[in-house]
């Protein structure tokens, strides 16, 4: 009976009240927030944008980011790592996932898995030929490197043993010569092909540290005004310099190009049609460089932990930044409107714990990678858990509304239990769980002890018990540690004696 009631409550709040006995239809109700890992703009329609998250799939906008819709129907893997929009059709989109890839021809309303020889491994990059959208390329750090000549219907491998060992990370097509491709890798520098991927030449000259280790390349851009001019970004700062490199000979050699850029690793690079360049750093924000210039100038540090950037088409292209690194920094999509930063969020937060308030119908508390939220009257409100979990911890993995004491809520976090006495809105005090001399473990389950007026059990690596939420004691001797639980009873363990097992006996009527 209790399980049915819980299922009904969850179905009501998550939009799944229809036919829990059969197919379940789920619709997102938030809360908004979470990391965005990629942004792609439609080259043929500046108002069309797509963003993706490795936690929540794809979202689409047809009004330059003012509003968003979920675009996940048909995606069997929501761990999306990259997107590419056809230059000929704003509704034709490709998505690379942790396991394979997908294509949509209706703006993300539906997706079909890419077959016909498409790699089933992790896909980190997809590139489409601007001159012929039937030519599509895909690459992944597990060694995948493939090409399609028929808009994704069939695929053939164009990788070699050397490219596979180098761990492909990014693909770029020379805008002035679509047969010239560049492949950025995590272990082999940059590869170049002048025959649409039939053969590859590697170059790491200048991309190594003092002892010869090749820097992992995670950002790459080709200058549309000068085919020999490239920029590359690394995942780590280079000594006292930032991780940005420059080549003026089509990638044959590279030099550090950090003037004015600081020392933060580079996560994204992009050339505008006029040859000006934009760089995103992990924590430094956005930098820009004029055509032909050698010095970077800071643009804004409003958006932190930028994962990808994209220009919308047009004479004065808008720059969009997908950012976030939960729980350290909240994420979203950022841009500038008349010089003022704008942030738009979509519901891609990880929600490790969810609980309905038994005393207030319609109220739910959810813990996320961006903090705790309260859902009531159809809206989410962030909760200020004053001395609750911090960015150094995992978010609470469990929540218990104590049915015996009005307003008492327990949050199971990493190595501790946070106790609230006002319905979960603030934290009153904290109890430690586990061995303080060992790494903390998440408390994954909490339950009110049957037959006790105050006892609570917490499940982590082992079972712990408390009567006040402050002092927690581990069971170590067949259950005698539970002697303090009011009116609770224990029965001997059946079979060989075990020091870790306790079998509770239901209380007398």
Image (tube, grey):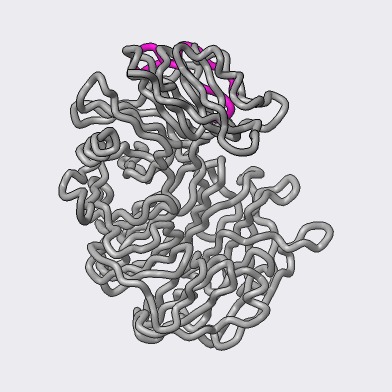
Q: Which residue sits at x=24%, y=51%? A: 69
Horizontal side of residue 28 vs 503, given as left or right:
left
Residue at 46 percent across and 11 percent down: it is: 486
Q: Magenta span has 419?
A: yes
Q: Is residue 424 visible?
A: no
Q: How many marks?
A: 0
Looking at the image, the residue that sits furthest to the front is 495
Magenta extent? 414-434
Quadrant where the image shows the N terminus: top left
Closer to us: 374 or 406 = 406
**Left or right: 144 with respect to 424?**
right
Q: Residue 51 location in percent, x, y?
A: 36, 54
* Above or below, 418 relative to 285: above
Say if 234 sits above or below 206 in the image. above
Q: Outermost residue toward the left?
A: 18
In this picture, is 316 found above or below 417? below
Query: Of 122 and 313, which appears nearest the observer?
Result: 122
Which picture quadrant has residue 284?
top right
Residue 465, image x, y percentages: 54, 21
Q: Work out whether residue 257 or residue 476 is closer to the camera in this orientation and state it.
A: 476
- Which quadrant of the rendered structure holds the C terminus? top left
Query: Seen in the image, is 297 located left or right of residue 374?
Result: right
Residue 489 visible to the viewer:
yes
Q: Residue at x 71, y 69 (%)?
A: 204
Image position of 17 with respect to 290: above or below: above
Q: Where residue 382 appears, x then y in whole percent?
A: 35, 26
Residue at the image point whose x is 59% and y is 24% from the top = 479
Report whether 133 appears left or right of 445.
Answer: left
Q: Position of residue 295 (x, y in %)?
A: 60, 50
Q: Nearer the viewer, residue 59 or 1?
A: 1
Whether 279 is among the magenta residues is: no
């Amino acid at each position: 009976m209790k399980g049915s009631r819980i299922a009904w409550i969850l179905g009501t709040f998550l939009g799944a009240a229809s036919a829990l006995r059969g197919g379940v239809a789920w619709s997102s109700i938030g809360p908004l927030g979470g990391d965005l890992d990629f942004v792609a703009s439609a080259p043929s329609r500046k108002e069309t944008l797509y963003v993706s998250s490795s936690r929540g799939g794809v979202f689409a906008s047809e009004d330059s980011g003012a509003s968003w819709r979920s675009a996940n129907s048909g995606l069997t893997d929501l761990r999306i790592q990259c997107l590419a929009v056809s230059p000929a059709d704003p509704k034709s989109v490709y998505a690379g996932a942790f396991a394979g890839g997908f294509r949509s021809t209706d703006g993300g309303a539906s997706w079909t898995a890419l077959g016909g020889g498409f790699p089933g491994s992790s896909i980190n990059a997809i590139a489409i030929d601007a001159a012929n959208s039937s030519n599509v390329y895909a690459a992944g750090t597990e060694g995948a490197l493939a090409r399609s000549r028929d808009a994704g219907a069939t695929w053939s491998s164009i990788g070699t043993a050397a490219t596979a060992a180098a761990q492909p990370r990014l693909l770029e097509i020379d805008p002035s010569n679509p047969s010239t491709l560049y492949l950025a890798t995590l272990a082999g520098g940059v590869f170049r092909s002048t025959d649409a991927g039939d053969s590859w030449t590697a170059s790491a000259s200048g991309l190594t540290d003092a002892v010869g280790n090749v820097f992992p390349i995670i950002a790459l851009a080709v200058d549309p005004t000068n085919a020999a001019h490239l920029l590359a970004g690394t995942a780590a700062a280079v000594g006292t310099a930032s991780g940005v490199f420059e080549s003026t000979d089509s990638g044959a050699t590279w030099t550090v190009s950090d003037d004015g850029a600081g020392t933060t690793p580079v996560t994204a690079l992009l050339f505008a049609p006029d040859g000006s360049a934009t760089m995103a750093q992990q924590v430094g924000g956005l930098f820009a460089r004029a055509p032909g210039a050698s010095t970077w100038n800071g643009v804004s540090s409003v958006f932190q932990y930028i994962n990808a950037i994209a220009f919308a088409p047009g004479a004065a292209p808008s720059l969009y930044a997908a950012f976030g690194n939960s729980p350290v920094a909240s994420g979203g999509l950022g841009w500038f409107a008349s010089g003022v930063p704008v942030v738009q969020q979509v519901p891609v937060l990880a929600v490790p714990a969810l609980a309905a308030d038994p005393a207030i119908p319609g109220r739910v508390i959810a813990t996320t990678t961006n903090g705790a939220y309260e859902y009531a009257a159809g809206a989410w409100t962030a909760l200020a858990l004053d001395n609750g979990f911090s960015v150094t911890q995992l978010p609470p993995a469990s929540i218990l509304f104590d049915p015996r004491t009005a307003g008492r809520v327990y949050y199971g976090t990493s190595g501790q239990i946070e106790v609230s006495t006002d319905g979960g809105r603030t934290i009153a005090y904290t109890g430690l769980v586990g061995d303080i001399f060992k790494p903390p473990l998440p408390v994954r389950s909490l339950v009110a002890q049957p037959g006790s007026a105050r006892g609570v059990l917490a499940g982590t690596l082992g079972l712990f018990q408390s009567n006040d939420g402050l002092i927690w004691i581990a069971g170590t001797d067949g259950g005698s540690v539970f002697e303090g639980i009011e009116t609770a009873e224990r029965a001997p363990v059946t079979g060989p004696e075990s020091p870790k097992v306790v079998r509770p006996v239901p209380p007398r009527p």
